[in-house]
């Protein structure tokens, strides 16, 4: 007999949990299906452990810039890894399960797959099958999985992905990293800072972090190089060999060089987790992300009962964006279930179209929202860009010797509003939200002029950007 709920959520990562908690709080009976740990990739193998590994490295960089302070020896990597274990609750999700229970969400452990309209079959851990049926909605929130490029010998060499690097029991002496994106930069920095003797990054393009302003990738490359990371641009792995499982790994490069390392990390992007999700049973293609409209409803499914939030819809693979999409989806599901208006301004996705905010937790931190100058120009805006050196504001100067960085604002000249803002500087993360408010709310430069930054804070860079612009 099928078990009937108002809402079925497949995947208990941050996006799925937000949907489940919010629709249950509105009184809809809710079940969430999870095949691994409730809390998802973010809690155990992504955001949380990676930032726990980076925090001491970041702070050590800060200490090195302040006169009168010095580190008493290298970072205690063992203590950092032990703290990481605490941050990930020792890979035990009972706290999350208790929260779901308290939120009146039924947790079903197993792999869910669609079998037709409003119907999800769950293969449970004990080999059984449960059939769930939804009165109102099924929400896919299955996240993403790493892509392993088809390099000869790579898969057989059992490379590290985000899972193994964030859950490492020890810091490898020699690490090769394939990729020049966010995971590659953050994890190269973490492992080098925690004691890896040799870290080599193989970057197939001409720079790091190719989705942000070019000066950001250049600053991170400079910093990684200064810290002793060997950043090799326009270089790729051609063949990987690991004769002994767990033994040394040898990587032959397209340049002809060979590198030997203790571990190899693949950080070449992620794809939506749609394998074996039964998309074909509801008429959706199995080869691409689940496309959605601006209320997170899957496009191409009759009667509008299917939704997709978070990494699985391919829009912005970031936890905060998945949770934002989850708030939209849950509010429209509740409104539609009650027969109420489902088109309040908070119920439509605007943020994805503006350009998602993101902080890359390297040293310097890369903090960006909205469009880059190149994106804005390509989209046909009437663009003017201004930049300012962050080391020149008094608040920056006070943060330490050699404090530096750059801010950039991309302005839509026709409306005198910000299309995008980027800060690249140590500890700049908390500056970003002011920029996100300005971009999302379309605050004009003439209004921003009256938002006076306190002296002496790094926020004075806002004033300097406006002065550069001509105010
Ligand atoms: C190393 C790393 C660091 C990151 N750091 C940050 C960061 O600092 N900030 C940030 O915003 N983002 C960060 N991200 C991205 C972030 O982790 C993802 O955007 C986020 O986890 C997506 O949330 P989600 O709920 O969509 O999916 P997930 O967190 O992937 O959760 C999906 C859940 O669904 C489950 N599932 C999948 N298929 C099924 C099925 N068929 N049946 C049942 N359950 C299923 C999975 O087991 C998983 O628990 C990072 C990513 C990586 C790899
Ligand atoms: N702080 C954060 O917000 C944070 C941290 C980590 C990850 N994330 C999210 O996780 C997602 C995945 O991160 P990621 O670093 O894996 O992906 P990414 O898309 O950021 O970077 C992938 C990198 O791999 C390279 N690449 C792709 N295919 C390749 C191939 N075949 N051979 C060699 N290089 C190849 C790309 O050129 C790029 O440099 C990101 O999109 C990001 O949104 C966010």
Image (cartoon, rainbow, N blue to C red):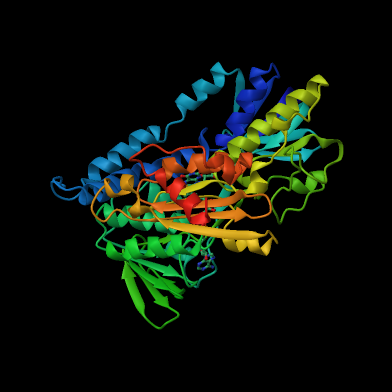
Asked where in the image residue 343 lies, by quadrant, the reply is top right
Q: Is residue 235 above or below residue 109?
A: below
Q: Position of residue 293 (x, y in %)?
A: 76, 43
Taking 23 as reference, is 230 left or right?
left
Task: Identify the residue shown where x is 55% and y is 23%.
Answer: 100
Q: Nearer the viewer, residue 299 or 81?
A: 299
Q: Is residue 405 above or below residue 318?
A: below
Res 343 visible: yes
Q: Nearer the viewer, residue 197 or 62?
A: 62
Task: Identify the residue shown where x is 54% and y is 16%.
Answer: 102
Q: Position of residue 214 (x, y in %)?
A: 49, 64
Q: Is residue 333 above or below residue 111?
A: above
Q: Nearer the viewer, residue 78 or 335?
A: 335
Q: Position of residue 355 (x, y in %)?
A: 61, 49
Asked where in the image residue 430 lies, by quadrant, the reply is top left
Taking 203 as reference, is 288 left or right?
right
On-image quarter of the N terminus = top right
The residue furthest front is 471
Q: Is residue 310 above or below residue 380?
A: above
Task: Identify the residue shown where x is 33% and y is 52%.
Answer: 190
Taking 210 as reference, is 301 left or right?
right
């Amino acid at each position: 007999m099928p078990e009937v709920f108002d809402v079925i959520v497949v995947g208990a990562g941050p996006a799925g949990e937000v949907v489940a908690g919010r629709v249950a709080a509105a009184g809809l009976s809710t079940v969430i299906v999870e095949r691994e740990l409730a809390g998802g990739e973010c809690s155990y193998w992504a955001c949380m452990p990676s930032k726990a590994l980076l925090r001491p490295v970041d702070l050590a960089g800060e200490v090195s810039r302040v006169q009168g302070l010095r580190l008493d020896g290298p970072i205690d990597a063992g203590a950092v890894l032990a703290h990481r274990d605490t941050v990930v609750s020792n890979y035990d999700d009972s706290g999350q399960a208790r929260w779901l229970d308290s939120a009146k969400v039924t947790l079903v452990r197993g792999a869910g797959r669609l079998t037709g309209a409003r119907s999800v079959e769950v293969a449970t851990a004990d080999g059984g099958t449960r059939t769930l049926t939804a009165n109102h909605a099924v929400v896919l929130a299955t996240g993403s999985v790493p892509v392993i490029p088809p390099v000869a010998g790579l898969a057989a060499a059992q490379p590290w992905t985000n899972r193994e690097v964030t859950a490492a029991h020890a810091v490898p002496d020699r690490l090769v990293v394939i990729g020049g994106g966010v995971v590659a930069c953050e994890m190269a920095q973490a492992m080098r800072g925690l004691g890896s003797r040799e870290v080599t990054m193989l970057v197939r393009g001409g720079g790091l972090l190719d989705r942000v302003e070019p000066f950001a990738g250049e600053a991170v490359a400079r910093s990684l190089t200064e810290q002793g990371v060997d950043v090799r641009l326009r270089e790729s792995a051609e063949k990987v060999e690991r004769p002994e499982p767990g033994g040394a790994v040898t990587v032959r490069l397209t340049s002809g060089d060979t590198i030997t390392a203790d571990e190899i990390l693949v950080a070449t992007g992620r794809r939506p987790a749609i394998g074996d999700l039964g998309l074909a049973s509801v008429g959706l293609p199995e080869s691409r992300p689940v496309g959605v409209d601006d209320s997170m409803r899957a496009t191409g499914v009759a009667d509008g009962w299917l939704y997709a939030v978070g990494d699985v819809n391919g829009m912005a693979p970031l936890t905060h964006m998945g949770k934002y999409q989850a708030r939209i989806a849950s509010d429209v599901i509740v409104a539609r279930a009650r027969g109420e208006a489902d088109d309040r301004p908070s119920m439509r996705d605007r943020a994805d179209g503006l350009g998602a905010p993101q902080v890359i937790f390297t040293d310097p931190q890369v903090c960006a929202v909205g469009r880059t100058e190149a994106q804005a120009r390509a989209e046909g805006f009437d663009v003017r860009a201004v930049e300012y050196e962050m080391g020149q504001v008094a608040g920056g100067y006070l943060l330490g010797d050699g404090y530096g960085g750059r801010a950039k604002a991309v302005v839509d000249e026709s409306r005198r509003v910000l299309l995008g803002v980027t800060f690249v500087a140590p500890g700049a993360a908390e500056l970003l939200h002011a920029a996100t408010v300005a971009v999302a709310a379309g605050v004009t430069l003439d209004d921003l002029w009256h938002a006076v930054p306190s002296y002496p804070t790094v926020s004075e860079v806002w004033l300097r950007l406006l002065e550069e612009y001509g105010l």
